[in-house]
């Protein structure tokens, strides 16, 4: 059996994600956040929050424009999301407003600050 | 005002098995901040996976981690099968579970040994790793490899299990069960072991949930969570593995 | 005072009967590292060759290094190598340490350990079995025995 069988997928506006997460927690439905994944789709960057709720998996998709990839951080309401958000910040260049700790974590120290490896225009030949 | 001390650990440190760098900020004995730098170990697998074919990716993704390689490969093939809407034979799903469970046993024994080593109980390390060779032999018997098994492929598994191997596996598991029960008894009875670990870095249940802890870490804090039961994959929906949510609160 | 020839014979003898190793993962997947550790445990027991695992490069004669090495770690790797007392040897364990292995071509990895360090022995495999790692160290010891 594929795990996709008991998965639910929803899409919400990016600016509501913090409220959505905090509602899940106050309603007592939140059990676990597996990870946050992200990908670039043309001129937008989409993030997927993989929650576990009593009914099964809940995948929440939010999209932000590539030109201005900013959305509220959920780390003030869910401290465990920090590492996921910092990883996305490093690799996709998404900015999380209100993130508890915004330091670089994944990329090497010498890596240029404005280059994001998982964007489609990234070329490893351009690296110094 | 208290004086803060910065304590760098890594990338080369006898405690670390991987090259990571932690920069702890201490206020006396209390850790007030930590800066984690993983760039020493960053390879760029995510980008490489975009550039390669699905089959090449499978073998690369298996090498994300040499300890839990089957899990990563299973994830990848399941995602790919989901995209392709491929049906996987039930026997293949069960074989994925068999290898996954054997891998889980080897991984738990590995960390039990390493935990013994880190607290200066090297006898435990040596003895546990001796018994870990039993499960390594079984993995080699079934998949042909001790680490990075190469068992999964898109749409199924690459090797079947013959009756002789099943018999051998059951025999090995019996020994392992006996030994594991013995270790459980040792670590719960040994007063020096308990004195060394009890009350050290306890993770309260609420913090375990809000920091998204999973697996044995979460269950050790009393969180009743097991992905095999709560979000079953492969054949886990038909076997419902026993889950132990245990907490050493008595020792805190 | 012993004559120089006898002295150097004794030094060489002690060198190949008790080489102390330091083990360093330079950005690998951990597969080779657990196999290296397994080589130290009772089934394989590399200590019967007098090999002892040390925690600091300053006590070590042999650097057992795994992983493809990357842009950030290469300076640290070089520093660890420089901290080891002479004479020192490097054993590159695993496909990654030989050529970059499956990670060759990733943006943060290099094409093998010999871009950073002078390697004496290579142990192929992904990961090599503990027996293969022991064989690699044994080959190195044989080389030392001959005074090479």
Image: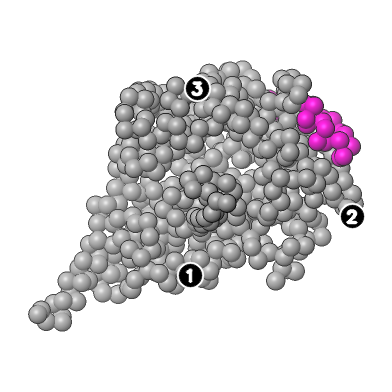
Could you say which is closer to the camera, residue C109 or residue B42?
A: B42
Q: Position of residue B120 (x, y in %)?
A: 34, 42
**Of the two numbered discs 1 and 3 in the rendering, the one whose residue sits closer to the viewer:** 3
Q: Position of residue C122 (x, y in %)?
A: 43, 63
Disc 1 versus disc 3: distance between alpha carbons?
Answer: 45 Å
Residue for badge 1: C78
Q: Which mark is residue B246?
A: 3
What residue sits 29% from the left and 42% below the top?
Answer: C42
The magenta stretch spans residue A12: yes
Residue B11 placement, left or right of A124 = left
The magenta stretch spans residue B118: no
Residue for badge 2: A67
> Could you tell me if the residues under marks 3 and 2 are in contact, i.e. CB atoms within 8 Å?
no
Residue farthest along the bottom direction in this orientation: C4
Assign a secondary structure to mark 2. loop
Q: Which mark is residue B218?
A: none
């Amino acid at each position: 059996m594929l795990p996709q069988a008991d998965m639910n997928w929803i899409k919400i506006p990016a600016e509501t994600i913090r409220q959505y997460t905090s509602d899940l927690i106050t309603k007592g439905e939140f059990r676990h956040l597996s990870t946050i994944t992200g990908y670039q789709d043309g001129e937008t960057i989409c993030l997927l929050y993989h929650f576990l709720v009593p009914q099964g998996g809940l995948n929440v998709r939010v999209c932000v424009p590539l030109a201005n990839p900013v959305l509220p951080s959920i780390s003030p309401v869910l401290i465990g999301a920090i590492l996921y958000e910092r990883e996305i910040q490093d690799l996709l260049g998404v900015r999380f407003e209100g993130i508890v700790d915004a330091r670089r974590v994944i990329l090497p120290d010498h890596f240029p600050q404005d280059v994001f490896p998982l964007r489609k225009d990234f070329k490893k030949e351009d690296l110094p | 005002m208290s004086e803060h001390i910065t304590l760098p650990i890594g990338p080369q440190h006898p405690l670390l098995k991987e090259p990571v760098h932690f920069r702890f900020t201490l206020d006396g004995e209390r850790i007030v901040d930590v800066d984690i730098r993983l760039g020493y170990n960053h390879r760029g697998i995510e980008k490489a996976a975009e550039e390669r074919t699905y089959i090449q990716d499978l073998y690369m993704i298996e090498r994300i981690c040499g300890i839990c390689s089957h899990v990563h490969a299973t994830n990848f093939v399941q995602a790919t099968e989901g995209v392709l809407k491929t049906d996987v034979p039930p026997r293949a799903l069960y074989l994925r579970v068999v290898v996954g469970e054997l891998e889980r046993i080897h991984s738990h024994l590995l960390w039990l040994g390493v935990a013994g080593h880190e607290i200066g109980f090297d006898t435990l390390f040596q003895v546990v790793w001796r018994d870990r060779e039993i499960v390594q032999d079984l993995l080699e018997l079934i998949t042909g490899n001790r680490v990075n098994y190469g068992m999964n492929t898109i749409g199924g598994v690459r090797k079947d299990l013959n009756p002789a191997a099943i018999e051998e596996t059951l025999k090995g598991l019996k020994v392992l069960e006996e030994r594991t029960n013995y270790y459980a008894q040792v670590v719960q009875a040994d007063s020096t072991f308990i004195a060394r670990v009890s009350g050290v870095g306890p993770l309260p249940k609420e913090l375990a949930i809000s920091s998204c802890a999973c697996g044995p870490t979460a269950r050790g804090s009393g969180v009743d969570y097991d992905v095999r039961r709560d979000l079953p994959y492969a054949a886990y929906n038909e076997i419902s593995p026993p889950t132990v949510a245990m907490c050493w609160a008595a020792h805190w | 005072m012993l004559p120089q020839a006898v002295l150097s014979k004794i030094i060489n003898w002690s060198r190949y009967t008790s080489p102390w190793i330091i083990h360093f993962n330079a950005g690998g997947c951990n597969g080779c590292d657990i196999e290296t550790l397994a080589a130290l445990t009772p089934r394989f027991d590399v200590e019967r060759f007098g090999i002892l695992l040390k925690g600091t490069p300053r006590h070590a004669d042999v650097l057992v290094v795994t992983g493809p090495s990357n842009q950030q770690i290469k300076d640290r790797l070089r520093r660890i190598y420089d901290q080891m007392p002479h004479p020192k040897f490097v054993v590159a364990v695993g496909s990654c340490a030989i050529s970059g292995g499956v990670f060759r071509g990733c943006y943060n990895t290099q094409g093998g350990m010999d871009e950073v360090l002078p390697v004496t022995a290579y142990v192929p495999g992904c990961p090599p079995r503990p027996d293969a790692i022991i064989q690699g160290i044994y080959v190195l010891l044989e080389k030392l025995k001959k005074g090479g």
